[in-house]
Amino acid sequence: MLAVKELALQEKETIIALRRHFHEYPELSQQEFATMDYIEEQLHAWNIPTVRVPKGGVVATVDSGKPGWTVLVRADIDALAIDEKETNLTTKKVVLSKAKGVMHACGHDGHMAMALTEAKILAARKNAWDGKVIFIFEEAEEFGERGVSPLLQYLHDEKIHIDMCYGTHVMWRLPAGKVGIVYGTAMAGAFFFNVTIHGCGGHGSRPDMASSPIEAFVSIANEVRAFRMRAVAPEESLTYSFGSVNAGSKPNIIPSELSFSGTMRCTRNEDGLAFRTFMKTTLPRIAEEYGCTVEFTEDQYMPAAVNTKECVDLARRAVVTALGKDALDEDCPMWMASETFALIESTYPGVLVFTGIQDEHVGSGAPHHTPEFDLAEDGLVSGVGTALAYILTVLEEKPATPSFKAADLKTMIDMLDPTKS
């Protein structure tokens, strides 16, 4: 196998330059047009063909020209609507966003830099491996009509067979130079809900003549709180939060509508789907008791990202062999954030790896989605080495994955569609 640790180190300047470019020029979900142009420009310079999938992203194929397996590698490309701070936890950042109010505060700039560098290294050494590697650069991982669905549909419609998949997410609390590869659920399942309760407004002096959506919401909130205790096993995790509640403007006027939105996170899809069903069936019943009705304006479920056991076994072994035992964090826990890579892992056997980016010497270690977020660029070098070690080992060994059971693609895509309810 190629000396991936050395190859990653040789491309350190490439990784850093790519990451800093993407960080300087972030674009929001479904607006990543210049980002995709730049991605394709880099790939074409390395003689890697690409396809632009509408509302999905970029698909690039590195073909060795020899028969073999096909591995899919995913990188997400969108940024967040966050005003970046010039400093991280302790010092001034080495690069700042040039787009006011937009920032790569989740690490997608690092994800793109790693994937592009991996593609460059593989394309330059086709004689050293067999098969194909498909790189997908996914639009809108964060919000809206997420690009993972069109990408998966494209692969399905074009009959592009994928044997295994690989994804990574940089992790704020994991030291740079370390990678975490966990068994089972790597990142949480998520349910995004936005609900409007329709009632009948009135005056505070005659609440009996109104149907208050506020009273209905109070009862709903109590029922939701009770669900977790009676429906989720104590060794599993399910948590939820209301991110917004809006109703009324006057103390003596009962409003006719209340809207609320929030998210649920879970370690098991069975629990998450049960929560979704509970919300869809129980909310209308409670609202009816108060003379109200409910309308789901968003009903979006994302499955948990579950690593295939055999892929974890292989990835851990490949990392230790290629990068050394110290590179693997044996005790890295799962992460209660959610990831659209979960749909890819539900479709193909694979693994989601955590790439460490925390380093007190450069001031990185602030949580994701915060203005102080930053990453230690040295950690991205380890990320490239990890990906290459996994890809090349899969292509060489072609391991069986008896533990993997594919989910139904259409069902997953429909549940992720925020316009469906």
Image: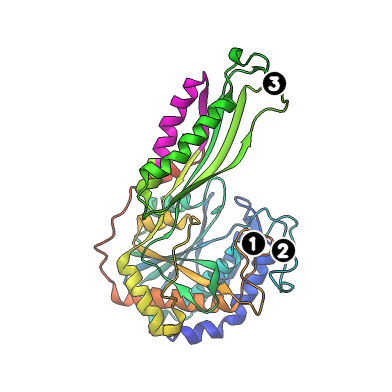
The structure residue drawn at horizontal position 68% and vertical position 64%, both measured from the top left corner, is 372
Please report whichever mark, 3 or 1, sits nearer to the chain's N-terminal start: 1
Instruction: Verify CB contact (< 8 Å) between mark 2 and mark 1.
Output: yes
The structure residue drawn at horizontal position 68% and vertical position 15%, both measured from the top left corner, is 205
**The magenta stretch spans residue 236:** no
Residue 149 visible within the image: yes
Q: Please state which of residues 348 and 64 is positioned toward the viewer in this rendering.
A: 348
Q: Which residue is mark 3?
A: 253
Q: Which residue is mark 2?
A: 97
Q: What residue span does the magenta drawing correspond to?
A: 275-298
Q: Which mark is residue 104?
A: 1
- Crowding at dot 3, Cα within 10 Å, few <14 / some 14-19 / many 20+, comes out as some
Q: Which mark is residue 165?
A: none
- Specify the amino acid type for callout 1: His
Q: Please state which of residues 129 and 146 is positioned toward the viewer in this rendering.
A: 146
**The magenta stretch spans residue 280:** yes
Q: Is residue 192 above or below residue 360?
A: above
- Crowding at dot 1, Cα within 10 Å, few <14 / some 14-19 / many 20+, comes out as many
